[in-house]
Structures are given as C-alpha cells and as structure tokens.
Image: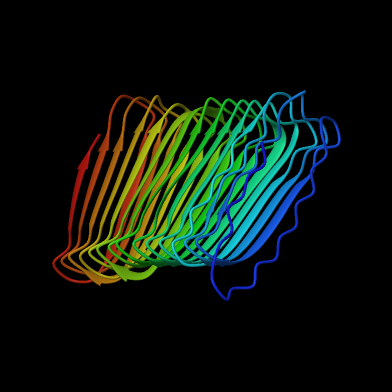
Amino acid sequence: MNKYRPFGVSVIIFLVSTVALAADNTYELTQIGSGNTASGDQSDASVVGSTIIQIQIGNNNDAEATQQGFTIFSSVVQRQIGNSNSSGGQQEGAIFTTSVIDQYGENNFGSSEQFSTEGNSSYILQVGSANSILVSQTDGVDNAASVTQFGVNNMGFTSQRDGVGNVGVAVQTGENLNFLISQDSSSLNTAIALQAGNSLTMFIEQNSSIGSNSVAIQAGGNNNFVQSSQEGLGQDSFILQNGTSLEVVHEQIGTFNTAYTEQFGGLNTAETVQSTGFNHAETLQFSGLLNESVLVQLDAFNTAIALQTGDTNSTRLSQTTAGNFATSTQFGDNNTVLGLQ
C-alpha cells in the first residue's frame, strides 16, 4: 500500500513515487507544501530488497512506513522539516535493517520499531520543541540505536531486548527532560547518555547481561537525577554530574561489577548499592558543601572508596560478611564519616 495526500493553494508540491513489487521494492515520496500526509507499507511477498524514503517539507506533516514479513535488505528513511511533524517506522523480520528519522520543527514525534532483526541500526534526530521519541529493537544482533534531541520538553525511551552487542546512545539538551534506556537479556551492551540543562532525569537499565557498560553524563545544571540499574556479571557503570542539588543512584546485582561516580558542586547525593560480592564502588565529590555519599555492599570481597572535598560533607560506608575493604578521605571542615563492617 502506497498512499499520499498532498494539497494546498499556491504551494509547490513535488512528488516522487517509485514503486516496485515483491523482491525489488522501492517507495519514494517527496512533498513540499502544507497539510501533507504520507504512508508506506511494502506489501509483503516477502519484501526482500525494499526501501522506503519519505521527505516532507512544510506544515502538518505525517509520515508512516511499514515493512513486513521477512524484509531482508530493508531500509526506512523519513525526513521532515516543518511544523507539527509526526513520523513512524516499524520493520518486521528485517535482517540488514536501517531506520533513520530526521525531524526539524515543532511538536515532533518519532518512533522506530524493529523486530526479530539482525545487524539493524536506528537513528533519530529531532531539533525543535516538545519532541518525543520511542525506539524499540527486539531479538536482534549487532543492534545500535542513537537518539539526539535539542529543544524543549523532550522525552525518550529506547528498548533493546534479547540481542548481542547492543549500543544505545541518547543526547538531550534543555529543561525538564526525561529519558530511559533499557537493555534486557543481552550481552556486551553499552548505554551512553548525555544530558545538559536543569531538572533532568535519566534511567539506564541493563538486566541479565555479561560485561555491559553504562555511562551517563549530566553537565552544567541543577536538580538532575541519574539512576543506573544493572543485573549480571562484570558490569561497569560510570556517572558524572556537574551542578547543584544532583542525585546519583547505582544499583548492581551480581559479581565483579564496578560503580564509579563523580560529582562537582554542592548539595549533591551519591548512592551505591551492590550485592553478591567481588564488587568495586568508588564515589568522588569535589568542590562543594553539604554533599552526601552512601556506599552499601552486601556479601564478601568488596571494595569501597569515597573521596570528598569541601565542608559539611558526610560519608556512610556499610559492608557485610568477610574480606571487604573500605576507605574514606575528606578534605575540609565539619565533615563526618560513618563506617560499618
């Protein structure tokens, strides 16, 4: 199914539509004007060499693209420049899958869903205001998802499940932003998140994985929050924050995991909880007042390191059972340390 609905008065409308059936599928659409609507769908049988490219420049654009069945050489590219843009995606059974969504303007929404894929990649860039993103990758190998948002009131969600070698990257700048990266039942995952602004929230979840890495950076803002939750073996989590009234939470379940926190500024809180033993936790808080560091490690053979510079800071260290090591260093006045082993 290929459908489009261009209309307008004194508006140049340039239309390219190339359709080939079955194995040689190609669909291209370019619309310049107002009130544009585009759709795709490459009707099965069972797709093979399909390509959908949709470009819309104008007002009130909406684009949808669907590739079904086995897909194989698939690719969906949707670019919208204008107002009130909404896009889509969705690829099923695709093997050499790629989905790219670029949107510039206001009130953008971008979505890309890839199912049962191999070697897939999804990239979404939205520049504007009130943007929202959903990326879902399921049952894939060598997955990569990259999300970039510049504007106001952005939020996003990236989910990668049951795959190997997944990489999730998110970049957001602005105020009151939220993002969640979820990687489940996979190995060698990497999640990288960068946020700049105030009142930011970032969640990273990695479950049932081996050797996953999590990096979150929040730069130059206030009232920001990051939580990294990891379950598995050999996980690494690194969080860096710069500002005031910041909070970090590390949760790690499993063995041979590492949690590392750096905070610059005052009125900040860093919490790390690790269970199952043979874990390493390190929290560094610099150049601030009234900072709080909490490190809790359950089971045996754990290492905890805390460093604080400034005044009126506090550190609490708690370790259970045997073979644990803990150290706390503070520079400044009116600082406190509470240790329990």
Q: Quadrant of the C terminus?
A: top left
Q: Nearer the viewer, residue 259 or 100?
A: 100
Q: Nearer the viewer, residue 229 or 104?
A: 104
Residue 80, quarter of picture:
bottom right
Q: Quadrant of the N terminus?
A: top right
Q: Residue furthest front?
A: 9
Q: Position of residue 209 (x, y in %)?
A: 54, 28
Name the residue: 57% across, 76% down. 10
Give the side of residue 244 with respect to residue 79, left or right: left
Name the residue: 50% across, 61% down. 35
Q: Position of residue 66 (x, y in %)?
A: 63, 37
Give the side of residue 103 with respect to residue 308, left or right: right
Residue 67, quarter of picture:
top right
Give the side of residue 47 with respect to residue 273, left or right: right
Q: Residue furthest bottom?
A: 10
Q: Is residue 306 above or below residue 207?
A: below
Colouring style: rainbow
Q: Nearer the viewer, residue 28 or 155?
A: 28
Q: Is residue 255 above or below residue 318?
A: above
Q: Is residue 53 above or below residue 288?
A: above
Q: Is residue 215 above or below residue 288?
A: above
Q: Position of residue 176 (x, y in %)?
A: 29, 62
Q: Position of residue 154 (x, y in %)?
A: 38, 59
Give the side of residue 14 with respect to residue 235, left or right: right
* Number of marks: 0
Q: Nearer the viewer, residue 94 or 269?
A: 94
